[in-house]
């Protein structure tokens, strides 16, 4: 039975969002205790991505060999796309894998799971409502991804409903979308956590498939709109981890209206296992996680220039 504050009378029932995870009790994706809704689909292909399952728009089968008990239910259900391996475990021919969402309940050992399912706005609000007692001290909901603005129609509907219920909203975004998509969310988003990955167009295009000019123009417009914006810089060895590159990004941030906070996100390896589960090669498999001390020069420079600085999220 749904409680009254989740009444769906005015909710756009036809709006649906492709979600791949809902993370509760997060303290690293905005202020206070937050529920993070991870939305699937991203226009970028960052080589260091820690959520590779977020890049594709549709559902994807993930296989954790360490959990496999060889029960064989997935083979029987796979229409030839899944077969037993010569060794322990299974082999997945992903090119033949149709309707991956039907494998979500096949494996009792949870070695085979499906990342991504469509959820209605009412369904999401019901899940979010379970966490309402914990949204004190500025907590609320953070939309992450993937790229939330890749599903802008459903996102705007969800943000409006959250605003009606007095639930604070943050959005993590690359800003690599048309300006109209960003503008539609401004009235309903409390804080934008916007990534600035690089100011060099050719380097960003090579490593992430992104247009640096588009991101920077959108960042300038967003800052100029009066929205509350915090800039996040993922620090990636071999991509932007030099004083010259990071200082140029900081100087750009200083040119933005009303933006005075930067977060440095050091490269980590926590997403490495997901590539194997997706049958993909991790481009950064040989790279070591960064240590906090490696950010020291960037933090000192930012503070000296008058910015508020956070590290690690």
Image (cartoon, grey):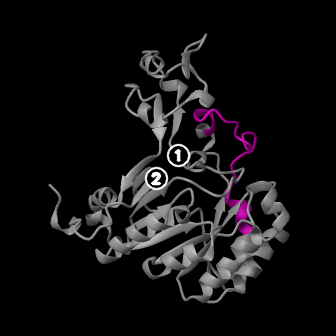
Work out whether 35 lies above or below 276. Answer: below
Q: Which mark is residue 58?
A: 1
SS class, disc 1: loop
Which one is nearer the viewer's eye here, 100 or 167? 100
Residue 295 painted magenta:
yes
The percent position of residue 187, horizontal first and vertical second, equals: 45, 82
Which one is nearer the viewer's eye here, 232 or 206? 206
Residue 249 seen in this snapshot = yes
> Label 2, on which residue?
18
Point out the image quarter for the N terminus.
Answer: bottom left
Q: Cα distance, mark 1 to mark 2? A: 8 Å
Q: Mark 2 Cα within 10 Å, few/some/many (few <14, many 20+)? A: many
- Spot the residue most to the top: 86
Residue 137 seen in this snapshot = no
The residue range painted magenta reads 275-296
Does 7 sit left or right of 117 as displayed? Answer: left
- Is the residue under label 2 in contact with that under label 1 (CB below 8 Å)? yes
């Amino acid at each position: 039975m749904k409680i009254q504050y989740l009444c769906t009378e005015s909710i756009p029932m036809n709006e649906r969002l492709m979600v791949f995870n809902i993370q509760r009790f997060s303290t690293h994706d905005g202020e206070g205790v937050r529920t993070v809704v991870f939305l699937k689909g991203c226009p970028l292909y960052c080589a260091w991505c820690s959520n590779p399952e977020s890049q594709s728009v549709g559902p994807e089968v993930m296989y954790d060999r360490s959990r496999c008990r060889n029960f064989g239910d997935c083979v029987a259900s796979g229409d030839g796309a899944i077969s037993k391996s010569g060794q322990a475990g299974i082999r997945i021919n992903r090119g033949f894998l149709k309707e991956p969402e039907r494998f979500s309940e096949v494996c009792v050992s949870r070695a085979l799971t499906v990342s991504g399912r469509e959820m209605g706005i009412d369904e999401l609000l019901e899940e979010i409502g379970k966490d309402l007692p914990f949204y004190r001290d500025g907590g609320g909901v953070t939309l992450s991804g993937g790229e939330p603005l890749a599903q802008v129609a459903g996102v705007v509907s969800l943000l409006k409903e959250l605003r009606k219920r007095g639930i604070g909203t943050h959005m993590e975004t690359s800003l690599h979308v048309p300006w109209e998509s960003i503008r539609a969310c401004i009235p309903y988003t409390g804080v934008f956590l916007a990534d600035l990955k690089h100011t060099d167009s050719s380097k960003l295009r090579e490593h992430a498939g992104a247009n640096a000019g588009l991101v920077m123009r959108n960042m300038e417009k967003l800052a100029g709109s009066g929205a509350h914006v915090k800039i996040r810089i993922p620090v990636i060895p071999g991509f932007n981890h030099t004083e010259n590159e990071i200082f140029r990004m900081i100087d750009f941030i200083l040119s933005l209206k009303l933006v005075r906070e930067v977060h440095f996100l050091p490269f980590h390896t926590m997403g490495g296992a997901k590539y194997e589960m997706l049958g993909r090669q991790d481009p950064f498999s040989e790279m070591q996680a960064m240590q906090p001390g490696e950010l020291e020069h960037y933090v000192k420079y930012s503070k000296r220039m008058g910015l508020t600085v956070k590290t690690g999220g």
